[in-house]
Amino acid sequence: MRKPTEVRGRHKKQSGGHGQFGDVVVQISPLPRGAGFVFSDTITGGAVPKQYIPAVEQGIREWMGHGPLGFPVVDFSVNLSDGSYHDVDSSEMAFKTAARIAMVEGMPNCSPVLLEPIVAVEIHVPGEATSRVNQIVTGHRGQLLGFDGREGWTGWDTVKAHMPESEMASLIIELRSATAGVGTFTYVLDHMAELTGRAAEQVLANRRAEAA
């Protein structure tokens, strides 16, 4: 997410006998990449009884597995600052529901964006194929980091790059073609990066189609 927001989530239901009532006010804020999720509370005066605060966190954690764009939400904090309860109708379930309502209503205000995994890849190829492999990498949204002679392999190079993990399947096919099947590579997850433009639109369209 790009920006913070404050939102109230209120769950009230009456259907004979005991009803359901939970009411929370939370501040949702972005955290640095890789920070995960942090929950806190600054409740005073018993606005939300202590026994219900863990239920608020649980409701948020259940929600974050499937966020507004159809994917898990990462790298954000939520602070529970206020709310209200009913002596008879409040329950853990009611506060879990109120927390989920707050997140559903508040997250669109945080300008959420898609992230995609970026891998650090080392590609080992015969020297005559190096320039072609460099073109393949950049053609798959990769960022070249450089290349050097492969240690212990005369006439071979090692190309280093960052590439979206989603492009790796295509890399395998083109690398085999460019090196007559002898090129190899290894990769590890390096970081997450924002996905925008047509690529992001395509991912969202595919997710909506899957959910239909």
Image: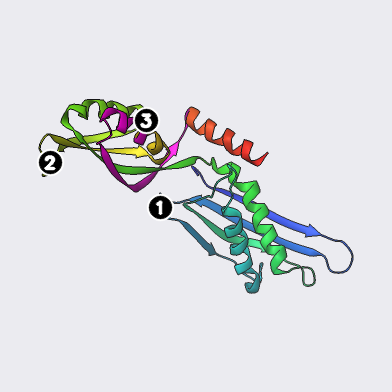
Q: Does residue 154 lie above or below 105 as drawn?
A: above
Q: Does residue 85 lie above or below 184 as drawn?
A: below
Q: Earlier in the sequence, mark 3 or mark 1?
A: 1
Front position in the image: 197 or 183: 183
Please provide the residue range marked out in magenta: 172-197
Residue 140 disc label: 3
Residue 10 on the magenta segment? no
- Specify few, some or many for label 3: CA neighbours under 10 Å numbering under 14, 14-19, or 20 or more: some
Question: Residue 131 vs residue 1: left or right?
Answer: left
Q: Which amino acid type corresponds to the residue marked 3 in the rendered image?
A: His
Question: Residue 150 vs residue 161: left or right?
Answer: left
Q: Which amino acid type corresponds to the residue marked 2 in the rendered image?
A: Trp
3 vs 1, front mark: 3
Disc 2 is placed on an element classified as loop
Question: Residue 159 vs residue 84: left or right?
Answer: left
Front position in the image: 176 or 159: 176
Q: Which amino acid type corresponds to the residue marked 1 in the rendered image?
A: Gly
Q: Which residue carries the number 2 mark?
A: 153
Q: Which residue is drawn at 28% across and 34% down?
A: 181
